[in-house]
Image (spheres, coloured by chain):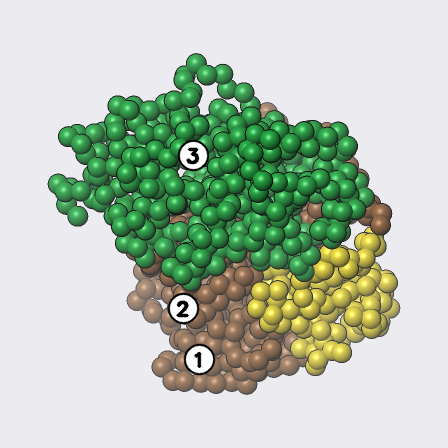
Chain colours: A yellow, B green, C brown
Amino acid sequence: MASKALFKYLPGHQAGAAGTVSVLVNGAVVRMSPASSLAAGLLAAGITAVRVSPVGQGARAPYCMMGVCFECMVDVNGRPNQQACLITPEDGMEVTTMQAAPSVLDAQEAKHV
Amino acid sequence: MNNNTHSSDVIVIGGGLVGSSVAYGLLRQGLSVTILDGADDTIRPSRGNFGLVWVQGKGFGMADYARWSFGSARQWPALRDELQAQTGIDVELMQPGGLHICLSEEEMAQRVDKLRWLESEVGDPAYRSTVLSREEAAEHLPGLGPEVAGATYSAMDGHCNPLKLLRALYSANIAKGARIHNRMQVDAIRKDGGIFHVSAGERAWQAPRIVIAAGHATQQLSAMVGMFVPVRPNKGQVFITERVQPFLTHPTNYVRQTDEGTVQIGDSMEELGFDDMVRVPVNARIAARAVKCFPVLANARVVRTWAALRVMSPDGFPMYQESDSHPGAFAVTCHSGVTLAAQHVFCIAPWVATGLRPAAIEAFPATRFTPETEVKPYGI
Amino acid sequence: MSNPAIPLNDAPSQLRDLVVIGAGPAGMAAALAAQRRGLDVLLLDEQPQVGGQIYRSITQTDAQRERILGADYVYGKSLAEQVRASGLTHWAGASVWQIDPDKTVHVLRNDRTTRIETKSLVIATGAMERPFPVPGWTLPGVMTAGAGQILLKNAAVVPQVPVVLAGCGPLLYLLAAQYLRAGVEIRAVLDTSAGTDWRLAIRHASSLLAGWGYVRKGLGLLREIKSAGIPFFKDVGGLRIEGEDAVRQVRFTSAGHSQQIDCELVLLHQGVVPNTQVSWSLRAEHHWDDEQLCWLPVLDSWGQTSLPGIYIAGDGAGIGGALVAEMQGALAGIGVANSLGFGTSEDGAQQRAQIAQHLRIRPFLNQQYRPKDEFRIPADEVVVCRCEEVTAGAIREQVQLGCVGPNQTKSFSRCGMGPCQGRQCGLTVTEIIAKEANLPPQEVGYYRIRPPLKSLSLAQLAAGV
């Protein structure tokens, strides 16, 4: 699923260490720290491209990490287009990378975080 | 061009949808046109338009307006084709029929009464609407919510991309040789020996005919050439979502999905003067209503909200007037610049060019109003 | 199918004396200064902890990161501690999506919308990276240097592959030095400054001397980088990032020679600019600054905008750095206190003198690290609007047709209509139009910024009050 990770944790901070949570990303479990953003967790897990542009269909990835570029948008618990850099990972969170504009007719009822 | 000769056959004051449509109509008849448009960050109602090409329900109390709108919708495909041929821009006209959603039985009943009155007054077998139950409406509108009472459907209705329309008119006008001057605020008009002198600050232009289609400046400018053309701002809030997968092929009165895939949602009507700031309680009502109509939109994300100031006449219907004291000066104003674009190109422009007032606009002189006319809030 | 539950809104809270938006150094200092003078203050930030970006995650860091990031970062701890100790009301995870002309703040927090009424506002939303439009800048594998630093601060995450750093400005060199300390392999530094023109630098000699502390720091960083033997390319132009659906290489010229470097990760940076989204949305007055090449809000000596009761402090007022931000925040807090009749009517002269002292280095930095024209006003083929994928050429076409304003070009091209609502393209578009139409940027103007400042769902909007 994941391409080669462009990023890694500093020594002593590996995902899986005590204090991490399990997040489902496209159905697979990814360990992340709840002290850092969902976008950081995705990048460190090798998930760089998180969506496809609905305009030109090109792959897009987090760019600014501070909420001003709107590139890091993913589906979180059934809600599409959430900025991953502003979200704290939680145990059991379900994240889906977005391959196209969201479909409203197929929308599941939002599972409240 | 030096100031001693005509700038062009016609000067059009106002480069929004109305001015650009009339200008295009004039250009396609072979006249030369100068367009004077305002600054980039002014009110610009044309940029806030909802994009409906709509007929049903319009003209209650004035059947001529129903006919006028219907006529425009029928001529719209010809306009679309011409603009595409001229500029390569497809303004995305779609006329699959539109639905007016009703959220209560009482609303349905009132709506039906209104439509029946219109049908009987207009008296044209092609001018028709159908009453639909919620289930029938849901066949046209996927995801229609359970709280919808019903809808009225009309094959006459459709929508387009209003910004592409504006751009297409702009490009077509340039291609046909219009001289467009941006960032101009016209402050004086006088007539001298059959020629109108129009000035904006240090700049000046001359022409034997002028069209005042200047949105909220229309009244002030019309007064300079002896016309009383009362307009006032009527505020409508609209917002638009991110792109979603296509799901709505028919436009409705509250919600439509654009050709881009975004969903446009509206609207409201308030009389607050020139206040164009967005208010949360109004948007909350619009959003709640949209979610009632389409619960599937609950999680769609709103990307931008805005408020547009409609150019509203005292009765809500257009004003098409040639000045009696200053013949050759025409005022052209309405708040449905998208729907009426075809009429403005194919009917209003020839009137301006020839001075021969068409029968279809007999009902819309500005002289039906005087400064003593009582102004009731429109649509509120 | 039942309706999804529409979240409830919180009942409007009481009328506050001051709401501070942004919990970086300026926001923290403003909130503290006001609270200490007896005001009822609410501090809002969309992040989970205080610190803004410069002190991101300062309350959750560790010795390893502190060593890498350096003393300037660690300094932020004291501010954060003061906020904690003060008992200030701080709402984390609060996303401001609209501010009304009467200063009512609309916030989305924990899925609930809330309206906050206040007598005054300090906007301390800081800076953002200047857009850096080059071919390929939207590819996965391209981020900003600021993003790299945030990953380090926030997540203890660093590049695992050799990284190319491209651009100019102190933050780029700082990041390079930090990465070296962290053991990250830096493939190359591509410096896009126009080159050290010492004649120009001498013109700013007095500001150099006044800000020698800053300059010495910068020189120290450069020494660190150069002594590590990292390939350092000067006078870089023609930068292109290439790859199919991810970065594969960069091409550029350096002092006229063509170069190509294989890489998978590029971090871009050509300075930071005020994040003016909130201030434009309020219709506050701004002016274009030719030295900083960006829009600056028009402010009085307390930091008050053209809108009474609304102040801006920190990098959002003009780039000055973290210490200046803190001082400006304090000044704004005092100004608010004075205006509401609290405190001892201090005149703020001392704070202003300190701020002026720290700002004296700025003319030199603005000159030395002025982003090149080609990277602010790119070639036709370059995408300037990332969201809607509109190119510089498309904007120029509109200008050729007579459009001289960004709102008209937006209407005609969709540039600026995407989710970021002009944050990544606004400056570029103003400058493209200005150059193409031969008008000063001040006359060209900027986008009309409308709410929501952050997108929210229809259900959330429906619950708004």
Residue A111: image location, x then y, percent: 83, 55
Report the disc number at residue B360: 3
* Subunit that carries the residue with mark 3: B
B328 or C345, which lies in front?
B328
Q: Nearer the viewer, residue B72 or B339?
A: B72
Location of residue B272 with respect to A68 vertically, above or below: above
- Distance (Cα) linking label 2 and label 1: 17 Å
Q: Give the camera-side residue of B286 and C281.
A: B286
Do dots 3 and 1 share one subunit? no
Q: Amino acid at mark 2?
A: Asp
* Numbered circle sitting on residue C380: 2
Mark 1 packing: few (<14 Cα in 10 Å), some, or many (20+)?
some
Chain of the residue under the numbered disc 1 shown in the image: C
**Residue that numbered label 1 is attached to:** C252
**Residue most extreme to the top:** B372
Instruction: Give the label, 2 or 1, closer to the camera.
Output: 2
